[in-house]
Structures are given as structure tokens and as C-alpha cells.
Amino acid sequence: MSVVFLHAHPDDEAIFTGGTMVRLAELGERVVLVVATGGELGGATAEQRQAETCRAAEVLGVARVEFLRWRDSGMAGDPGNEATDAFCRAPVEEVASIVGDLLRSERATAFVTYDEWGIYGHPDHLQAHRVGVRACELAGVPTRYDATVDREYLHFVETHLVVEAGGGRTEGLGLAASSIGMPTLLIDLTVDVRAVLDRKRAAMAAHGSQIPETASVMQLPVQAFGAVYGYEWFARTGPPGPLDVLPST
């Protein structure tokens, strides 16, 4: 049996669910990662980004990584949205059938993808949600977790860190913005991953083409990094599942 994660691009798994993956693996759960695209529009080749993902997955305790090899669609309005092999244009039923087969073969007890807004509206994240919903239906997986972020919490943290750092240290974090994620009230589960934050940070660093050590995120002091990345948030559809037994707030 396993918990299967569907992410849109290489590095999404580390940023949004890396600590949860580690926590699950430590409890003996088989963790499977499915990556929809090659992330080609991130400035590196798909091959390089896949290699980075495999290194990150090893750090996170992931037992299996599968790449669906659709093309990165880019942000909303990007010309990449119109590519015939862009993930956002992929037939949902076709992709869901592939993912559903994997869910059955892995005897998945739970499935993780993004919330219905794609956390921040990325076309590939939105498509991953649509595919994930349908794949769970096809495979009969009872519990689906939608990864999100708590926009109210992050807004508070960012405000605090900016004041504390004199306005310079948190520029470019890329998470704390009022238009992303969900309000606290709609979030079912907050997983506390601070105890495994070193492994989450190492997994993020494995994606060096996207998150170099010189990036503002990686320059944050330990306490500030933990305040932003030390929690992972999920909305749940279906009965309580494996993520519900993880340390939470």
C-alpha cells in the first residue's frame, strides 16, 4: 500500500509537500511521486530537472518516481499554454487513466495533489487537480488530500519577517501572497514538518537550477525558514487517512 503524490513540476514536491513525504516515509508508508511535466520553462532541460527530482526524492524517502513527460505549460497567458503537448491541454480522461492505473498497482490508500485553485493558479497545477480528482474516482481511492497554503498564516509571517529584517530579507519568497492558497477556515490539516526541516531544505536545494543557494529563500536564517516552510497544509476529501496521523498544529 502507498500514498501517491501528483505534482506538476520538478521542485513542487519539495516546496509544498517535502516534509510530509519525509514524515510518511519515517512511519513506514510507501511514498510514490508522480511528476506531470519536465519543467522545461524553468530555464533548464527536462533531463536536468528530472535528475534533480530524483536526488530530491532520495532525500525525502520517496520509494518510486514516475515522470509523465508532458510539456511545461508556463504561467497563465504564457505562449507555452498553446503547445499541443502542454500538460494543461492534455485530455483529462487520458492522463487520469494512466494515474489511476498507477494508483491501483500501488494499492494507494490516499492521493495528494493541489487544491482546486492550483495553489496559485498555475495552469499545470489546475490540471493536476482535475486529473487527480478523476484518477481517484477511477481507482476508487477513498481519501484525497489537496495541498495548499494557509494564506492568512503566510501573510502574517511575511509581514513579521519583513519588519524584523528591515524589509529586505524576504523579497522573492514566492509563497506569502494574499491571492494564493486558502483561508485558514477551509484547511483541514496542518502538518508540522519542523522536525524534518533539514531534509526538506536539502530536497529544495537539490533543485539547484531553480533554487540555488544564492536564492533569497535559501539565505533565510533557520528560524525564518522554519516559519515559512515548517508547515504544510491540506484540504481533505473523504475519510481521515495517513496524513491525519502526522504531527499537526
Image (tube, rainbow, N blue to C red):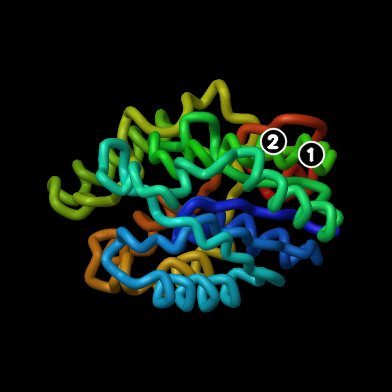
Q: Residue at x 63, y 66 (%)?
A: 66
Label 1 packing within 10 angstroms: few (<14), some (14-19), many (20+): some
Residue 82, x across and y down, in percent: 33, 43
Q: Residue at x 48, y 58 (%)?
A: 37
Instruction: Give the labeled residue for mark 2.
Output: 134
Q: Are dots 1 and 2 in contact, CB under 8 Å?
A: yes
Nearest the viewer among 69 and 213 is 69
Nearest the viewer among 171 and 128 is 128
- In screen coordinates, is 29 left or right of 90? right
Residue 76, x across and y down, in percent: 31, 37
- In screen coordinates, is 66 left or right of 36? right
Q: Which mark is residue 138?
A: 1
Please say if 5 is above or below 53.
above
Quadrant housing residue 147: top right
- In screen coordinates, is 117 left or right of 106? left
Give the secondary structure at mark 2: helix
Please say if 37 is above or below 249.
below
Q: Residue at x 51, y 65 (%)?
A: 200
